[in-house]
Image (cartoon, helix red, strand yellow):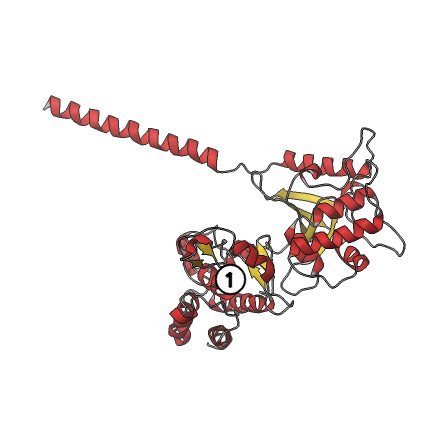
Amino acid sequence: MWRRLSLRRICLGFILITAVAILYAAFKASSIIIPKACTDDQTTRIFDNLCNLYQSQAVGGNLCEVICTSKSIIYEDCLFKGKGKKVIAATYNSKKIILKSRNERLEEFELLFSANDKGGFAPPEMDYDSFKSMFKSHMEALMGIKLVDSEDVLLSKMWTSPILQNDELTPGEMNSVWTLVQQSEFNYLKYFHGAQFLPDIYGSCGHFYAVEYIPSGKILDPSLLSLSEQWDSAPWPNRAKIGLSLMDLIASTETFYSEILHLCDVKPDNFGVTEDFQVKAIDIDISFFTPQMRDYLQQPDCTADEDCDFFDCHGACNKSTQKCLDVRTNNNFQSVCSDIFLHHHTYPGLLRNPPAEVATEITELLDKCVNPSREEKYIQTPSITKTFQRLHSLLKESLQIR
């Protein structure tokens, strides 16, 4: 009896020690893998560094004065982790804004002019006309499209302060705009400023730019809710309105410019929802026009179609040559169906639990959206298909159901 009890205690003790060891190992692993959240001290350092650059005329921008002199932009919170994009919440004129930059420090970007020992800049190796010409060529290469604007118009469009006739940007301002256009999201927001599906951009200081604050909200991104709350939350009319606006956004990506803008990172927290349920794309870093999209898709060697996928933009493999084709085999609508409208993992799906009167057809349409027929699989079609149009109409009809 005693031997059996001792043996049982030894086994229980071994199991307990093993469990503790596993938990400790998991904790250590998570502490290595999960990036640390930003701190207020880190954000203070960012602002201090930016203002020191401004005071030495090393950077410029329409918001430098209100950040560094009048201090009208008031810091609220830092929203980034680790080495990712620096995202800072602030208020300006009682309005919440978001400050963003790919890098924390100016020197982490490619610069046109380097600072000398006296705090100024090394003499430029190009005249101003050469800079404008190089700027346009650089912009076209970054965006993957031919820009119709003249060099002067393009520079005025991308810089955040007015450029008067016959005026030239200072070396600090040239460095600033050069760092800004190295950030793809800034290029889309500034060049296409006023596009309905993009947040407003308010300006910049150095390598940081400020945009409209539009949170995803608990309806579109209920990640902070428990699983039961996710399924029970948000009345259908609110979710249907967001679904309709998201579909309008998808339609806009194919009609607002001569080339389709491919959204390759589709997830709920990359979209924001306004108070009147309008959806805007708040993170479009991994988005490309068709010419650039083709270049990305045909890069790798492959043995299967999945090898050619670029995030949510799916490619196809030529099995005989083991090379990826330069075509995308899905579209923005299909990405939204699979990653936002439908349930997956812990995300409940925006269009969950529709009214009984339309539930069967909505389910069928969403299935058809993510699982096209075999004949359509390798043919990229525009988002605005018959399936798209019917789902859009059905969501509208569902808002009339009482």
Note whether 280 is above or below 13 in the view shown.
below
Q: As drawn, is 65 to the left or to the right of 384?
A: right
In the image, residue 392 lies at what x, y percent? 51, 73
Q: Residue lying farthest right?
A: 166
Q: As drawn, is 80 to the left or to the right of 193?
A: left
Which residue is label 1 attached to?
A: 327
In the image, residue 321 lies at what x, y percent? 43, 56
In the image, residue 397 lies at what x, y percent? 49, 77
* Quarter of the rendering containing residue 68: top right
Label 1: how many Cα within 10 Å (few below 14, some 14–19, many 20+) = many
In the image, residue 162 lies at what x, y percent? 83, 55
Q: As drawn, is 206 to the left or to the right of 263?
A: right
Note whether 335 is above or below 40 in the view shown.
below
* Quarter of the rendering containing residue 188: bottom right
Q: Residue lying farthest left?
A: 1
Tag 1: residue type? Val
Q: Residue lying farthest front?
A: 321
* Quarter of the rendering containing residue 273: bottom right
Note whether 33 is above or below 160 in the view shown.
above
Q: SS at mark 1?
A: loop
Residue 280, visible in the rendered structure: no
Note whether 311 is above or below 125 in the view shown.
below
Residue 175, visible in the rendered structure: yes
Observer-nearest residue: 303 or 177? 303
Q: As drawn, is 66 to the left or to the right of 375?
A: right
Identify the residue at image location x=67%, y=51%. Answer: 97
Observer-nearest residue: 15 or 337? 337
Identify the residue at image location x=79%, y=61%. Answer: 150
